[in-house]
Amino acid sequence: MRTSVITRFAKNTRSLSTRRTLAALATTAVLAGGIQILTTDTAWACAGPYEVTTPATPAPAATHNGDLTASFHQTRDGQTLIAGGPKVEVGVGITNFTGAPYENVAASIWLFNPVPGTGLRTEDFTVEVASGGTWKPVALSPGCDPSLHTNASPATVVKHLENGRAEHFTFRIGLSAKAPKNLGKVKIGVLGQAPGSQAVVGDSNFTFPVEHPAAAQPVPTATAKPSAPAKAKTTPVAPAKPAADETKTAAPAAEAPKSPAANSTSAPAGTPELAQTGSSSNGFLAGSAAALLALGAGVLIAVRRLRPQR
């Protein structure tokens, strides 16, 4: 009786020990795998355009030899992102050399702040894609790392990508003027993904420095002093005199000279002096002429009387 109880206890003890050992091994494996994922540089592929917007779909029936290829297309590294400034263009090329076509392949870009312990905010960035001759907005979502990536949309998806073909997309990125001042640079990469497949990260990524323009200081405007109103030059006007005074002070009008024709006799030619004599000289001449006539008459009478009578 005692032997059977001890045997059962020993069996239970060995079983419990075995379970603890297996649990410990499983925990170690999970932690090791987690550490490996965190330390690899390919952790960007943990999120892609289809990981956020649509549920996973079954893999296509076609057999692919390899994965899609994502790369930059006609994009220069080191372009400057100006907070509140113009947008910077980024080209993305998705190539299919897998031996079979892909359906609904999405192109995407991801953004990352390389400064440790800092992330990016969706409200600080604006992303657009060229489609149909215009720019269409593209939504951003945070990835499993402290990064942002664009979501799949009709403007970023090629419906059918044949084997041996490539499709190109042009994105442009704008940075808000309200972006944190400590944001000094942004790392940018490209992604390609089809439904049901892992997001493929491009082999290279670019780093764009960030510039924060200094806030323009308001220029103090000089307060203009009100100019004194211009005084109109006025000529002093003499006060008007009464009408009675004007008549007294007015200069008498010059009398028109009387015509001497009625009182003067015409002077013989050659005697201009007579023409200038007035009424007094005329009277004197008349008196003189009368005296001479009287004298001549007296002489004539005397001569007649002295002549001897015959």
Image (tube, grey):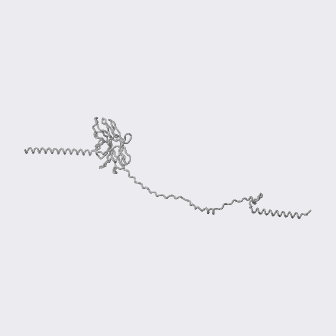
Measured from the top left, where is residue 194 in percent x and y?
A: 30, 39
Which is more toward the observer, 267 or 153?
Answer: 267
Q: Where is residue 45 in the image (x, y as percent from the top left)?
A: 29, 42
Q: Residue furthest left?
A: 1
Identify the image quadrant of residue 29: top left
Q: Count of labels shown?
A: 0
Task: Write down the quadrant of residue 133 in the picture.
Answer: top left
Q: Is residue 56 left or right of residue 239?
A: left
Tell me where residue 111 appears, x and y as whole percent.
32, 45
In the orientation shown, which residue stands out farthest toward the front? 244
Residue 127's place in the image compared with 254, above or below, is above
Give the position of the N terminus as an image quadrant.
top left
Residue 100, how many percent across, how many down? 30, 35
Name the one closer to the observer, 195 or 82.
195
The quarter of the picture where the C terminus appears is bottom right
Left or right of 260? Residue 147 is: left
